[in-house]
Amino acid sequence: MNPIAPSDLYAFTAPRIFDGEKTWVDHAVLVENGVVRAIAPASQIPASARLWSQPGCTILPGLIDTHAHFMRWQGPLFLAYGVTTIRDTGNAPDWILERRGEWKNNLWPRLLCTGPLLDGPFPIHPWVSRRCASAAEAVCAVRETAGSGVDGIKLYVGLDPVWLPAMAAESHRAGLKISMHCGAGGVLAAAEVGVDESFHLDGVMPDVWPSAPPGWLELWGLPEFAAMNDPQRRLADEITRLGMTVTPTLAYWDSQVCIRRPGFGHSEEARLIPPVLIEWRSGVSGGSAGYGQWQRALAAAQHFVGLLLERGARVLAGSDTPCGPVAPGVSLWRELDLLTQSGMSPEQALRSATSAAADFLNQPGLGRLAAGSSADLVLVGGNPLEGIPLNPAILLVVQNGVVHHPQALLNASIHASQSILEDRDPWSLQFKAHRPVRTRRQPGEPLPPQTSPGCENLA
């Protein structure tokens, strides 16, 4: 990585600059002291500026992945594909707050975080969750998580829907948006009590098809659900009316198709993912079973996203990596492509990972190339405003005024990914715990957390 000298003025030029909202032709992004000074016509670049010029490319703001779960091996890959900021949406709280404080010292994206998954009495992911066994504990968990300095609050599927109004009110009292992986209570109930954002389109099924058979998102691939157009339209109307933001993580849905495809572990798609992670996730998916149903489920999910877009709902780009076995960074470009297939224009898709994401996350210095914004920018070959590339040619990445060369980042990612078996990142521990074939716990292997700090013995 090459820091831009604080005293120097740099000009990054390209045929097109997308500033997060609109496109400039034959202009330059002027960078000084780690921030954007201005976007200026190429003919008016100050003589004192040091020039970076790349013909045939487009300059974008650094991309924001609004839904990820950080593991240290991912850092260089996010940057290599132009993702300069991620929001971690569920991790061990002390661990992720410590990582957030040290991102500048590593080849990592800037980190925002929601702390732990606030879940019910029996957390699905105990390594990264906080257990709530009563309404009082649930409100206390929101209060204490907000007080730890997180950037938002994340609710999970095991919470009693009756607790949600008080939890949402507590989060808003702390000045934080509250997001939810909705469960059996449905997404509409969450929206009605003030939950700001829903993830994965989970919670749609209870509202559209209350009598659905047991299952999860794969139920979207059943023909009965696909035929329920009127209930889907009514729900899309209500989500939009209530102002709920939706982050569908279509890349996760797509990953469930890919991982069931024979030979996926040896494919080009999997080359950047640690093989052991593919092994862990393939075991959970059950091999090739359900491949066709997940294909249909993805198509149904895209149809529902299209209904939301027709109504003007805010839809953000998030990939849910590494829960879906898609390589970090690449995963966000895949999400953008899937969003365009669902009805967004390429420009709208890029906004969903730049200015629209920054607005929702209350980060005015990110997601845009404007005077005073952070010097986060990406030079990508070709014109993604005409079509989102699945394998973008990233030519240069600047994050917070530091220049990164993609090939060096890819080389660093190979070394980082080799540490996944030795590291003690919470999601590594969680994935290991979810291996389908569990042997006796090895000596020294830690036990998952069983209780949450504070809030016990509350009435």
Image (cartoon, rainbow, N blue to C red):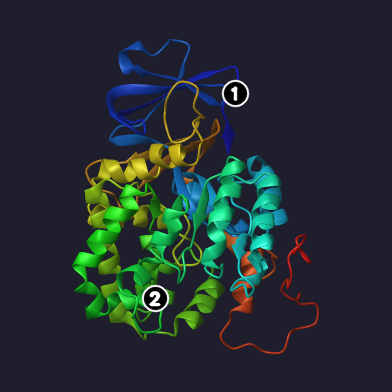
Q: Name the residue nearer the viewer: 134 or 87.
A: 134
Other-residue count near label 2 (Cα within 10 Å), few / some / many at <14 / 14–19 / ≥20: some
Amino acid type at circle 1 is Ala
- In the image, residue 21 sits, relative to residue 243, either above or below, namely above
Name the residue tied to disc 1: 5
Q: Mark 1 to mark 2: distance in Å?
A: 44 Å
Asked whether residue 22 is in view, the answer is yes
Label 1 SS: loop
Asked whether residue 69 is in view, the answer is no
Q: Position of residue 48 (x, y in %)?
A: 48, 11
> Dividing the picture into quarters, in which one does residue 266 lie?
bottom left
Q: Position of residue 44 (x, y in %)?
A: 35, 11
103 horizontally vs 265: left or right: right
Label 2 SS: helix
Name the residue tied to disc 2: 264
13 horizontally vs 50: left or right: left
> Dividing the picture into quarters, in which one does residue 52 lie?
top left
> Dividing the picture into quarters, in which one does residue 46 lie?
top left
Mark 1 or mark 2: whose residue is earlier in sequence: 1
Q: Name the residue nearer the viewer: 100 or 224.
A: 224
- In the image, residue 241 sits, relative to residue 180, either above or below, namely above
Other-residue count near label 1 (Cα within 10 Å), few / some / many at <14 / 14–19 / ≥20: few
Amino acid type at circle 2 is Phe
Q: Residue furthest front?
A: 459
Q: Position of residue 409 (x, y in %)?
A: 53, 49
Q: Nearer the viewer, mark 1 or mark 2?
A: 2
